[in-house]
């Protein structure tokens, strides 16, 4: 069994601090890591040296710990969530990565993020007990949302508040069904779905599932299975992993 | 489901159906009880927690936090979350307004209560309003569980906290 997991390399990524989270980009060519040193590092390999990872960029925009990073499903765009209450977006420019947007609005630490299947919207969840949905507006958009230069603008188009009674630690957007699941410090898992016929510029979401006591302690993470619709996994401070099957209720 | 079965072999799992559980939007509000709170409060005073809080030593001085009036009976608020779980809110007053060890005191309170409270609870610890110049920053830190875990992994800090939360002889 010893040889079934072989070390390729180790890098000191966030010196004197903790590394909180990692994410591979969809193409599998880059890895983003983030941590308590407030930095995000992007790792890649040289063209000829497939097993050697080196730091391609260090992103230093957040003023506090970075809790989570997530890649856009189809563009080379990275999003980060931070203790400084903001969400930031980064893209590649020439040979480096730059911060191209800062999303403000949450009133406390942003713990996690998820893009919707189309990549046009981003959901963020926070210690302020709300979920915010942000939408990307390209320059020259019909809605007249101002953009600076050639960078898209992101605007908060929906806030889900009053549903969670404690910090929301994680959010996951199902790429198959569009259902949004949240992991909360009140031990519950909730699922939201966009109302059919809701205005894309001002969508409304309904709570379609609320499981109290999903775990006996804080739920830290939720993840939708990428192939099987409705299959959800969750984990908790209580040390358990749980598997769930979600089915959208009739008439909602 | 083959992949899922593989995971099941090493972990506990439950498979439930989540369906048709639509509820009104507002989260259930915790009830601030009167008689029940008093009952819990009596328990806190007479036995474990508050005595536990009282006996935490100030990291800078030899006295306990109660002797220094950092904590007192009125600093504890208890709310019922459900039949088995309570929300415990502690509001403490740092020894001086610029006390650099306010974060450390908050950390000690959290560690002590987490270890000793025998009932299921959620814990919030705050500096009493108006008693510290950077209270918002400190409150945020001592209620962020990742920050608290990171702090407790610092061996120097951990040792100080362990010293402070020792039971008195």
Image (cartoon, rainbow, N blue to C red):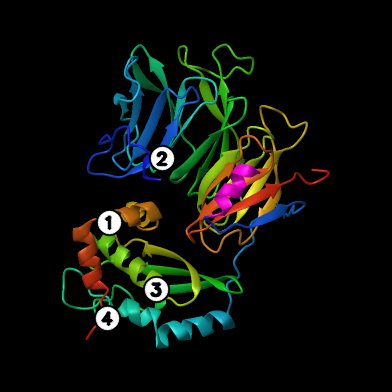
Magenta-colored span: B1-9
Q: Under tag 4, what secondary structure?
A: loop
Residue A240 location (% of width, % of height) = 52, 58
Chain under numbered label 2: A
Task: Give the residue at mark 3.
Answer: B75
Front: mark 4 or 2? 2
Number of numbered discs on residues: 4
The magenta stretch spans residue B119:
no
Say which quarter of the image contains residue B98: bottom left
* Whether residue A244 can be seen here: yes
The quarter in which the N terminus of chain A is drawn is top left
If you read the primary sequence from the N terminus, does the residue marked by circle 3 or circle 1 appear first?
3
Front: mark 3 or 4? 4
Answer yes or no: do the residues labelled 1 and 2 have beta carbons within 8 Å?
no
Q: Which of A156 and A80 is in front in this view?
A: A80
**Are the numbered discs 4 and 2 placed on the same chain, yes or no?**
no
Front: mark 3 or 2? 2
Near mark 3 (Cα within 10 A), the count class, few <14, some 14-19 or many ≥20, is some
Q: Under tag 3, what secondary structure?
A: helix
Say which quarter of the image contains residue A96: top left
* Horizontal arrangement in the rendering, residue A10 relative to residue B40 (left or right): left
| Cα–Cα span, label 3 and label 1 | 28 Å
Task: Give the residue at mark 4.
Answer: B167
What number is the disc on residue B24?
A: none
| Cα–Cα span, label 3 and label 4 | 20 Å
Answer yes or no: do the residues labelled 3 and 1 have beta carbons within 8 Å?
no
| Cα–Cα span, label 4 and label 1 | 22 Å
Task: Give the residue at mark 1.
Answer: B153
């Amino acid at each position: 069994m010893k040889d079934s997991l072989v070390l390729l390399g180790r890098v000191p990524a966030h010196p004197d601090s903790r590394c909180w989270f990692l994410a591979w980009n969809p193409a599998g060519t880059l890895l983003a890591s983030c941590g308590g040193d407030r930095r995000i590092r992007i790792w890649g390999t040289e063209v000829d040296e497939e097993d050697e990872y080196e730091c391609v960029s260090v992103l230093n925009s957040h003023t506090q710990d970075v809790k989570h990073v997530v890649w856009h499903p189809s563009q080379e765009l990275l999003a980060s969530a931070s203790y400084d209450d903001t969400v930031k977006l980064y893209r590649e420019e020439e040979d480096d990565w730059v911060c191209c947007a800062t999303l403000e609005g949450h009133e406390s630490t942003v713990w996690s993020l998820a893009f919707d299947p189309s990549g046009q919207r981003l959901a963020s969840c926070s210690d302020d007990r709300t979920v915010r949905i942000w939408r990307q507006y390209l320059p020259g958009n019909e809605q007249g949302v101002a953009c600076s230069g050639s960078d898209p603008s992101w605007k908060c188009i929906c806030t889900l508040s009053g549903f969670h009674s404690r910090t929301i630690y994680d959010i996951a957007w199902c790429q198959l069904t569009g259902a949004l699941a949240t992991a909360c410090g009140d031990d519950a898992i909730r699922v939201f779905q966009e109302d059919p016929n809701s205005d894309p510029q001002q969508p409304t979401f309904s709570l379609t599932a609320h499981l109290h006591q999903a775990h006996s302690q804080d739920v830290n993470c939720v993840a939708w299975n990428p192939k099987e619709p409705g299959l959800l996994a969750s984990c908790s401070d209580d040390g358990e992993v749980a598997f769930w099957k979600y089915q959208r209720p009739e008439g909602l | 489901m083959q992949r899922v079965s593989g995971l099941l072999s090493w972990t506990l799992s439950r498979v439930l159906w989540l369906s048709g559980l639509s509820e009104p939007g507002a989260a259930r509000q915790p009830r601030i009880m009167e008689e029940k709170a008093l009952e819990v409060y009596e328990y806190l005073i007479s036995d474990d927690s508050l005595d536990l809080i009282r006996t935490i030593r100030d990291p800078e001085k030899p006295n306990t936090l109660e002797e220094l009036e950092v904590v007192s009976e009125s600093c504890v608020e208890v709310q019922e979350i459900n039949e088995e779980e309570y929300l415990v809110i502690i509001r403490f007053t740092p020894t001086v307004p610029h006390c650099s060890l306010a974060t450390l005191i908050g950390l000690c309170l959290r560690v002590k209560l987490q270890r000793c409270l025998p009932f299921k609870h959620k814990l919030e610890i705050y500096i009493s309003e108006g008693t510290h110049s950077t209270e918002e920053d400190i409150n945020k830190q001592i209620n962020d569980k990742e920050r608290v875990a990171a702090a407790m992994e610092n061996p120097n800090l951990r040792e100080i906290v362990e010293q402070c939360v020792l039971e008195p002889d």
